[in-house]
Image (cartoon, helix red, strand yellow):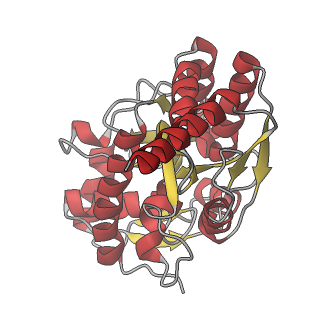
């Protein structure tokens, strides 16, 4: 019994020493999307400040593909030593487990949550010549012409698409969904009047709204976006409506708890930095933070909530 207890104490001391010495080489932060997108921008903001504040080397590794699944899977299969992290988000952690028939990872079993970094709403945008001046105008038209008002999104099964499904459920209306392969494909059709409205991330239409070519009707978060404070939320019409993209940092499962706790503490400090908050808010997002357990519970709740929406939408990817 004494030998067993001695071994346990020795193991705890070893883990503690490992955390104190951590990190002693560069940390890789996998971003499961291409450069310049919302997830990439948020990852670089946090990585840079984490490096500056602690004299660490945090390197961004973009691994796009399969809706973020490739990057998440690579992280899940990495050594659980704290030197490979990943910026996960709503699609690859909460939506894809139901959307994809054969997902190569389980978000709750194969990853160790560290901290919820932030979240950002989708925005409903129309061209400046659109007859729809408000969310009420759009929904009234959809009620009068079921299935005839067209909703463009960046793709089938995306957060934007499923946010639109949630809106249809809340308002008891039916839009015709027109999926595109990203904002660059959808915007010309929106500007040309070929679709009625676009459900998208704030950054993808921010410039067009600022220039007056597009008009934002509503955002899908509980609070108004810091980028467009005059644009109402859907929740102002349908109480409690909330459909956002959130971002959080995770490590492979079995990463030692002292390392997870150290990362959590340091990232939470970074998230309180005014320059970090300003950079994230500039992209239309808001800063979160919290404990690993809170992030774990949040992922679990989001998986259950989005699973219902995915099933009701009928979307599925092999």
* Residue at figure coordinates x 58%, y 24% from the top left: 266
Q: Residue 280's quadrant in the figure?
A: top right
At horizontal 79% and vertical 33% (from top left) the residue drawn is 24
Seen in the image, is 253 located left or right of residue 46?
Answer: left
Residue pictured at 75% horizontal, 25% vertical: 51
Q: Position of residue 297 (x, y in %)?
A: 32, 48
Residue 295: image quadrant is top left
Question: 18 or 254, which is in the foreground?
Answer: 18
Q: x, y percentage for residue 193?
A: 57, 59
Question: Can see residue 197?
Answer: no
Image label count: 0
Report whether 192 appears left or right of 158: right
Q: Which is more toward the observer, 143 or 55?
A: 55
Nearer the observer, 258 or 53: 258
235 vs 154: above or below: above
Residue 188 drawn at (x, y percent): 68, 58
Give the residue furthest to the front: 2
Relative to 118, does residue 62 appear above or below in the rendering? below
Question: Where in the figure is residue 258, as x and y percent of width and height?
Answer: 53, 36
- The quadrant of the picture occupied by the C terminus is bottom right
Residue 292 in view of the camera: yes
Residue drawn at (32%, 45%) of the image: 135
């Amino acid at each position: 019994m004494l030998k067993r207890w001695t071994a346990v104490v020795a193991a705890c001391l070893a883990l503690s020493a490992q955390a104190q010495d951590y990190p002693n080489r560069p940390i890789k932060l996998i971003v499961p999307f291409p450069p310049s997108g919302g997830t990439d921008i948020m990852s670089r903001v946090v990585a840079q400040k984490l490096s500056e504040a602690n004299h660490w080397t945090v390197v961004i590794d973009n691994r796009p593909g399969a809706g973020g699944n490739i990057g998440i899977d690579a992280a899940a299969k990495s050594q659980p030593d704290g030197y490979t992290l990943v910026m996960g988000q709503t699609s690859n952690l909460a939506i894809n487990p139901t959307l994809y028939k054969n997902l190569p990872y389980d978000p709750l079993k194969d990853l160790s949550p560290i901290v919820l970094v932030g979240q950002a709403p989708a925005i409903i945008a129309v061209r400046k010549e659109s007859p729809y001046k408000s969310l009420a105008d759009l929904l009234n038209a959809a009620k009068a012409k079921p299935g005839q008002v067209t909703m463009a999104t960046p793709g089938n099964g995306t957060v934007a698409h499923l946010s639109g499904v949630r809106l249809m459920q809340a308002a008891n209306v039916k839009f015709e969904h027109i999926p595109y392969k990203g904002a660059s494909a959808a915007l010309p059709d929106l500007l040309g009047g070929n679709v009625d409205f676009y459900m998208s991330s704030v950054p993808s239409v921010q410039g067009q709204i600022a220039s007056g070519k597009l008009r934002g009707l509503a955002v899908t978060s509980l609070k108004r976006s810091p980028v467009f404070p005059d644009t109402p939320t859907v929740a102002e019409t349908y109480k409690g409506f909330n459909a956002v993209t959130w971002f959080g940092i995770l490590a492979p499962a079995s990463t030692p708890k002292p390392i997870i706790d150290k990362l959590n503490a340091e990232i939470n400090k970074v998230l309180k930095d005014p320059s970090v908050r300003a950079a994230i808010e500039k992209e239309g997002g808001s800063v979160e933070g919290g404990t690993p357990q809170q992030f774990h519970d949040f992922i679990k709740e989001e998986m259950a909530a989005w699973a219902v929406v995915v099933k009701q939408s009928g979307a599925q990817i092999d």
